[in-house]
Image (cartoon, grey):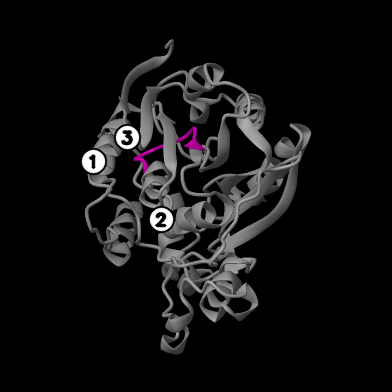
Amino acid sequence: MAGVKDSVITDRYAIYNGDSMDLMASMPDESIHGSIYSPPFAGLYIYSSNDRDVSNARNYAEFREHYGMFVDEIHRLTKPGRISAVHAAPIPSGNSGRDALFDFPGDVIRMHEESGWDWIGRHVIWKEPLAVRLRTMQKNLSHKTICEEGEAGGVASADELLIFRKRGEPVHVEHPTGLDFYAGNERIPSDLHKYRNWDGKQTGNRYSQWIWRHYASSVWDDIRLDNVLPFRDSRDEDDEKHVHPLQLDVIARFVQLRTAPGEVVFTPFMGVGSEVYESVRLGRFGLGCELKPSYFEQAVRNMAAVDEPREGEEVDLLSVIADDDAGME
């Protein structure tokens, strides 16, 4: 396949190292049941020097043109009535410490609508301010700024998961015994556990209803921010410090709600394999493509451990921010 340098294909997943556009071009219409991914944030992060990397666009107009091709192709590949979820966030227009924000999520919505998708909602994901500083290196997002020039203090912008539906009549996703597990940092009340896998009328399934109320909320403030796949070994020497995978809780909620066991979940920006990993763990077929070799190699390692018990990789945010602040003085 043109543009694909390496691959690992099993009966549970298929992952590719190469250009996603080449992979998608080889796939038939309406061959995936859902997709979830985090695109390059319009030049905010440069992930590689590869001239096929969308993050290397010369300007925003070029980025928009190239990313729009991905949106169109995913629309072609998605079955009617099914869902694509896109992780996005507002982008600082610069990093002087006094810059305006660009509404990147809003433009992602416009691009999808232009491609024929219906935008049906968004989940706002609360982010700890130090984590945002770590990821974006936003100069005005620090306690030091507040102490010295409070009027310039920044805001820790939330992440957003934008939900799009392809028009058409779907094959429905059914949960005959409701939702049977919860991905998040709260504890399900002990008196509700007797309702798990309730096979009676679902109006009486208080366990599933508790989970649904958390998942259906427009604000997700119960995501485990450190529940991510290992990623440190995937970094090249010239990588920017803020590279950080999407939380597994976010992916799990999409996969659990929007797809059924055995269905195909796709990600065109695979990174270290988070979306494929969580899809496989939940009984779906994971399909992903990643351009950068070091990320792909980490994805291979992560997928090899998909059946092993794991704990989220913890990031010592305070020490990282302290080091960054020291380097700026």
**Residue pictured at 41% horizontal, 52% vertical:** 282
Q: CA distance from mark 3 to mark 1?
A: 14 Å
Nearer the observer, disc 3 or disc 2? Answer: 2
Instruction: Check residue 80 in the rendering and tell me which mark sits there, or answer none.
Output: none
Instruction: Check residue 304 in the rendering and tell me which mark sits there, or answer none.
Output: 1
Quadrant location of residue 194?
A: bottom left
What's the amino acid at mark 2? Leu
**Magenta residue check for 271:** yes
**What residue sits right under mark 3 in the picture?**
295
Question: Callout 3: helix, strand or loop?
Answer: helix
292 relative position to 323: left or right: right
Q: CA distance from mark 2 to mark 1?
A: 17 Å
**Residue pictured at 29% horizontal, 46% vertical:** 231
Q: Earlier in the sequence, mark 2 or mark 1?
A: 2
What's the amino acid at mark 3? Tyr
Q: Which residues are magenta?
A: 266-273
**Residue 29 seen in render:** yes
User: Looking at the magenta stretch, what is its main secondary structure?
Assistant: loop
Whether label 3 touches label 1, CB < 8 Å = no
Residue 157's x, y, as percent? 56, 60
